[in-house]
Amino acid sequence: MMKLYHGSNMSLDKPDFRFCKPFKDFGRGFYLSDNYDQALELGAQRVRQTDEGVPTVTSFLFDENMLDGSEFKVLIFNDYSEDWVRFVLDNRDRNLQHPIHDYDIVYGPIADDGVSFQLRRYRRGVIKTLPDLIEELKFGKGITFQYFFGTQRALDKLVKICD
């Protein structure tokens, strides 16, 4: 079992898809990190965006064996790649019918905070190639990863830790 963290601007009793925003890197779902500091920063970012609450991290236990794909439909990106950036582009494209996939869990790199700006630059032709877009989207503090839970069935496997 491993610990995963979710950063927000409020305490979280139970993840609820009704509060998950669409058009994120891996689609509408519940996002976590295995890095506490990163989750805390995402919570602080949420506070800045909403001007409400305080940075809060909620901890969960996760059985990483779920990533083997035998029980759940899983997609894994172990590094920045053209497949990863195409997946992010499609999930953030408001002109496509959503959801664009039916994965229970997606694991992969977190894109830099300026994702929307960089994707617009790519679509307008300012950024010419997918490899150049990947470079622009790399997280400035080094590669960090996120866990996306996209179905209730997968979400139900997370166990909240009362710290």
Image: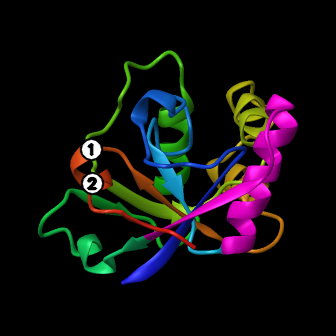
Which residue ends up furthest to the bottom in the rendered image?
A: 1
Whether residue 61 is visible, yes or no, is: yes
Residue at mark 1 to residue at mark 2: CA–CA distance: 6 Å
Q: Which residue appears at 44% of the width and 54% of the height?
A: 148
Contact, mark 1 vs mark 2 (Cβ under 8 Å): yes
Q: Which residue is mark 1?
A: 152
Horizontal side, residue 102 vs residue 19: left or right: left
Horizontal side, residue 111 vs residue 113: left or right: left
Q: Which residue is mark 2?
A: 156
Q: Eyeballing the image, is 91 above or below 11? A: above
* Residue type highlighted by circle 1: Gln
Whether residue 44 is in magenta: the answer is yes
- The percent coordinates of residue 144 (x first, y second) are 65, 71
**Quadrant position of residue 64:** bottom left
Looking at the picture, tell me which residue is in the foreground, 58 or 62: 58
SS assignment at label 1: helix
Looking at the picture, tell me which residue is in the foreground, 115 or 30: 30
Q: Which residue appears at 44% of the width and 27% of the height?
A: 18
Q: Which residue appears at 21% of the width and 49% of the height?
A: 153
Tell me the magenta residue range: 36-60
- The percent coordinates of residue 106 (x first, y second) are 39, 57
Q: Eyeballing the image, is 1 above or below 135? A: below
Decide: few, some or many residues near mark 1? Use Cα within 10 Å; few <14, some 14-19, many ≥20: some
